[in-house]
Image: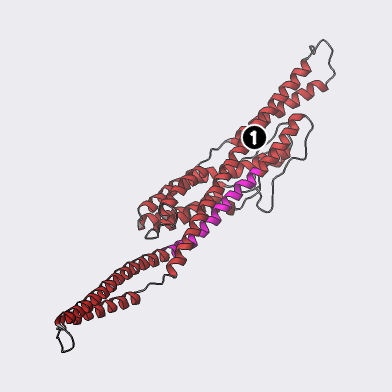
Amino acid sequence: METPEATGAIVPPKVSPELLEPLVTVVAILGELGATPGDIPLAGSPGSLRAKLVALIANIRRAMDHHQGDATRLRHALATAGATKATAGATTGATLEPAVVPPGDSAVRRATAGDAWAIVATITREWREAVASVAATWATVAGDAAHLRDACGTAATTGATAGVTMDHLTAAIAQEDRARQQLLAATRALPVASELATMAEVMAAHKTRVSEASAGLQAATEATEKMAVATVETAVAAERGRLAAVAHKPLGCLVAACHQAALFYCHLQRRLEDIEATVAAMAAGHGGPEAPGVAQEGPGFPGSTMTVQGGPGVPKDLMAAVAAAEALWDASARLAKCHLLGTLRMARGLLVNPNVPEATTVAQRCRDATAALPGLLPQGPQ
């Protein structure tokens, strides 16, 4: 039985499932936020936290639902380009009679090889642009989530520092009662004329006292009404602050997970930029710089889940780099389609209509997705 080492095929190394975990974490946190009771109006922005998160999910779905098959196209194009280059090199390197090679035939072969490498370059560029688009979408999602986190932080602080309490309202009501008693006393006091004052003067003084007491009661009543409104507003702000404080921590985790997802695709984008530079050098016929190999430390990327084998005209390191990019690009697509997109729809439903059983299902499906990660990734040489 032939082994990959014997055939020259490239066997990708084992890859840690942690590389894809941020994608699962994003969905799990959205489910957690959807299961939290209550909603939070956001100051200075139309809509509430739940409405903003529903809008955020639209971009998350767009980032997750990327297409597959880019590396497959690239590997096929590389195989064609390598075979064309090898055939052209073998023919032009042989000792042939002049009559066997028609004038211009070698130029045709060079043009054919150049066309094949141009196709490889186009496919590589299109794939790199697709990855860059996904990375940019995740960066936008992270920024939007950060705004929501900061708005919740502001609401939590405002609710915690609200100054009007029930004690203030009680004091206002007591003041209103005193003003009412004063009005009653002024009204009931009988005007009595004395030797030094006429009845008209006594009545005028009585009316003045009643009018002043009435004005005092009106002012006290208005103060009580304002204090009651302020007390209700304080209670609302305090409740909003409490809910915002509860949402603030998971929103911070959501921002971190979105940034990790963006970095994941940014790193893949840089790998493809290296591949693109190598392909451009190959197309120019200069061999180019050393092709990027498969990273085996840091945040590195794995090889394909399949063994791959380049043609005689394609450097093995270039094929390894393509396989490395393919593994996580396609693994992230499979993770989304098989596990996350359906769960993301459930999380969106929770944000619209909280439901405890649905929240439990979302959490379980996220755990199942995490458990499935090793099966989506290459396990390395056996």
Q: In this rendering, is residue 6 above or below 93?
A: below
Whether 248 is among the magenta residues is: yes
Residue at left 79%, top 24%?
A: 90
Residue at left 36%, top 58%?
A: 356
State whether residue 100 appears in this view: yes
**Foreground pick, 242 / 298:** 242
Prevalent SS, magenta region? helix
Q: Residue furthest bottom?
A: 195
Q: Quadrant of residue 122?
A: top right
* Relative image position of residue 47 (x, y in whole percent): 40, 52
The tally of labels here is 1
Q: In this rendering, is residue 80 above or below 3?
A: above
Q: Quadrant of residue 38?
A: bottom left
Q: In this rendering, is residue 220 above or below 33?
A: below
Whether 120 is among the magenta residues is: no
Task: Check disc 1 and give the amino acid type.
Answer: Arg
**Foreground pick, 6 / 164:** 164
Q: Is residue 246 left or right of residue 264?
A: left
Q: Residues within 10 Å of mark 1 (few under 14, many from 20)?
A: some
Visual colour scheme: secondary structure
Q: Residue furthest top?
A: 99
* Relative image position of residue 257 (x, y in whole percent): 54, 55
Residue indicated by mark 1: 125
* Relative image position of residue 364 (x, y in whole percent): 43, 55
Element type at marker 1?
Answer: helix
Magenta residues, as a range? 243-269
* Relative image position of residue 278 (x, y in whole percent): 73, 37
State whether residue 7 appears in this view: no
Location of the N terminus (image quadrant) = top right
**Foreground pick, 252 / 320:** 252
